[in-house]
Amino acid sequence: MRPLIIEFASNALTGHGGEPPAWPRIVEISFAESGPAVLIGEGVGHGAAGGRFTPEEALLRRTALLEAQGEWLIPYLERMARGETVTQDELVERFEQLHGRRPRFR
C-alpha cells in the first residue's frame, strides 16, 4: 500500500491578496512503515525542484522549511530525528489548530 502524503506547509496556504505566490514552496510528510519521509519542493513547471529527505536531512534545510512557512514543523522534525514517535494524527491536529482547516492529503 502506498504511504499517505500530507501537505503541512506551503507559502501558498496564507494567501497573497488572493494571488498565488510567484515561487511556491511546499513541505509534505509521508508516513510509511519504514519511517517518515519529508518531501520539500519549490517552483513551478519546468523550474520545479524537490527531494525526499529523512527528518535529519530536512532539518539541514531550515531555510526551505521557513520559506514554506513550516517553522512550526521544526520541533516535530527534531523529535523524529531523535527517534521519538510523532504521529500523523498529532501533526494533523496541530495543523488544524494553526490553520483552522485540515491539511491536504494525497
Image (cartoon, grey):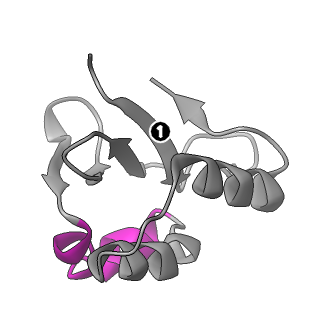
| Residue occupying the point 57% across, 41% down | 20
Q: Main secondary structure of the magenta part?
A: helix
Q: Amino acid at mark 1?
A: Ile
Q: Is residue 5 left or right of residue 52?
A: right
Residue position marked by numbered label 1 in the rendering: 6
| Residue occupying the point 24% across, 70% down | 58
Q: Position of residue 34 (x, y in %)?
A: 18, 46
Q: Position of residue 71 (x, y in %)?
A: 53, 77
Q: Is residue 32 left or right of residue 92?
A: left
**Vertical side of 72 occupied by 30: above or below:** above
Q: Quadrant of the N terminus?
A: top left
Q: Is residue 53 left or right of residue 1?
A: left
Which element is circle 1 on?
A: strand
Segment tinted magenta in the rendering:
55-68
| Residue occupying the point 40% across, 47% down | 28
**Is 92 part of what is drawn in magenta?**
no
Residue extending furthest toward the top: 1
Q: Position of residue 12 (x, y in %)?
A: 57, 47
Of 8 and 46, nearer the camera is 8
| Residue occupying the point 30% across, 75% down | 83
Of 82 and 55, nearer the camera is 82
Q: Quadrant of the C terminus?
A: top left
Count neighbours of disc 1 (C-alpha within 10 A) and say few if under 14, some if 14 to 19, many if 20 or more: many
Q: Position of residue 55 (x, y in %)?
A: 26, 69
Number of numbered discs on residues: 1
Of 39 and 68, nearer the camera is 39
